Image: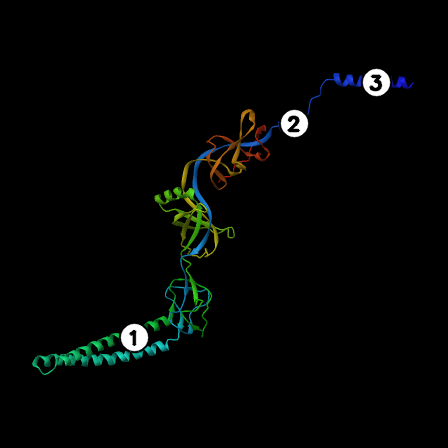
């Protein structure tokens, strides 16, 4: 019996093997990658596009002037409050000028005395000159009178210089704003002694109107910037992420005389009237230069451009409707539109939706697209 069971098992196994070998083949499930991926295609468009450069800049005041006394004196009056806007020539501090006034009066008295003596010396000189002609005076007397007159003339000049110096000291005791602007913290309080050698200035004035914005761009942009300046004024505008409402217009006014060899950038400055003081010295802003308009710029939506290890690229439909990777060079991005410098021509179709699921060689199928947003 065991032998009969073994023979039966072998016969059954042989029958199963024959069935598996002779049955018709079943269809394999389609591979996922063989199914076309739905994408949206859009042709690259040639159209006028503004030429803009955007960079991060810093607002700078045209003048930041520390106010220091030119003479030593006690502060007897402060004419402004911290943070006030002051005009050029506005009074800031008054120092005690009594010593200078006394020195002026003393110098004026000395001047009157020396002038009187000078008049007498000149009269003596004239008299001795006439007496010498008739032999009634000696040459020595004439020389002495000449010297006395010269000495007194010098004394009169010294007295006048002393008066001028005293008047200047009195003028310096009235400290005025050298430039218009906004005042900072007051370091010279009422009753304190102000000296020219003090470490801190009495106050610092920052000129708020106009201001400049300093920034840098890649040196490759320099020829385009110079060409725009040669054609006329270059418009500049600033904005700020911290203040979305900020939109101030100005113009490019400065190009540095040398390129920074370490960073490969060129320094620029734009000037803004800043009448409403919306720009504050030290503030970080985003500045945009408008260098003109490119009449026939090849453009695609910025989201169509991908970035890989070899640089920027887009997907285009290739042979047999399979995705093809096309390297491109971006000149700039303006309002969500990428301007292509190299790699595409007007009319070339690119994938603008669905590109995140693509790789080179994957089959694609075009579907309807959402209408593009106007830049």
**Nearer the N terminus, badge 1 or badge 3?**
3
Q: Quadrant of residue 73?
A: bottom left
Q: Circle 1 is placed at which residue position?
A: 162
The local crowd at label 1, few if under 14, some if 14 to 19, many if 20 or more residues have their Cα within 10 Å, is many
Q: Where is residue 67? Give x, y as percent.
A: 41, 66
Q: Earlier in the sequence, mark 2 or mark 1?
A: 2
Whichever of labels 3 and 2 marks the residue nearer the N terminus, that label is 3
Badge 2 element: loop
Q: Quadrant of residue 366?
A: top right
Q: CA distance from mark 3 to mark 2?
A: 38 Å
Quadrant location of the N terminus in the rendered image: top right
Q: Answer above or below: position of 358 versus 112.
A: above
Q: Residue beneath label 3, please?
A: 10
**SS assignment at label 3:** helix
Question: Horizontal and vertical percent for residue 172?
Answer: 36, 70
Query: Quick one: which residue is furthest to the bottom in this view?
Result: 136
Does 245 sit above or below residue 313? below
Residue 31 disc label: 2
From mark 2 to mark 1, how far is it between C-alphas? 105 Å
Whether residues under marks 2 and 1 lie with C-beta atoms below 8 angstroms apart, the answer is no
The answer to whether 312 appears left or right of 194 in the picture is right
């Amino acid at each position: 019996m065991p032998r009969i069971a073994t023979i039966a098992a072998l016969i059954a196994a042989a029958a199963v093997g024959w069935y598996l070998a002779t049955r018709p083949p079943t269809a394999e499930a389609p591979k996922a990658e063989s199914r076309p991926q739905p994408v949206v295609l859009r042709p690259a468009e040639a159209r006028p596009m503004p030429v803009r450069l955007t960079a991060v800049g810093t607002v700078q005041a045209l003048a930041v002037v520390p106010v220091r006394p030119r003479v030593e004196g006690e502060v007897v009056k402060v004419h402004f409050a911290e943070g006030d806007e002051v005009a050029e020539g506005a009074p800031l501090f008054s120092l005690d000028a009594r010593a200078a006034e006394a020195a002026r009066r003393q110098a004026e008295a000395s001047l009157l005395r020396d002038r009187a003596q000078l008049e007498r010396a000149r009269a003596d000189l004239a008299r001795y000159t006439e007496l010498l002609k008739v032999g009634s005076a000696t040459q020595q007397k004439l020389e002495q009178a000449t010297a006395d007159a010269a000495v007194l003339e010098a004394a009169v000049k010294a007295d006048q210089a002393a008066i001028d110096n005293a008047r200047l000291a009195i003028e310096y005791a009235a400290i005025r704003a050298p430039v218009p602007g906004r005042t900072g913290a007051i370091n010279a309080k009422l009753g304190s002694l102000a000296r020219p050698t003090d470490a801190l200035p009495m106050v610092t004035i920052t000129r708020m109107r106009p201001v400049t914005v300093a920034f840098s761009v890649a040196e490759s942009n320099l020829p385009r910037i110079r060409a725009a300046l040669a054609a006329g004024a270059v418009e500049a505008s600033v904005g700020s992420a911290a203040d979305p409402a900020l939109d101030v217009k100005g113009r490019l006014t400065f190009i540095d005389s040398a390129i920074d060899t370490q960073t490969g950038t060129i320094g620029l400055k734009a000037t803004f009237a800043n009448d409403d003081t919306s720009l504050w010295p030290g503030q970080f802003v985003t500045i945009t230069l408008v260098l003109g308009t490119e009449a026939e710029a090849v453009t695609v939506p910025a989201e169509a451009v991908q970035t890989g290890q070899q640089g920027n690229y887009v997907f285009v439909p290739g042979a047999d409707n399979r995705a093809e990777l096309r390297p491109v060079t971006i000149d700039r991005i303006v309002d969500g539109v990428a301007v292509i410098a190299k790699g595409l021509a007007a009319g070339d179709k690119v994938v603008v939706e669905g590109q995140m699921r693509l790789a080179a060689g994957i089959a694609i199928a075009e579907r309807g697209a959402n209408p593009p947003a106007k830049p």
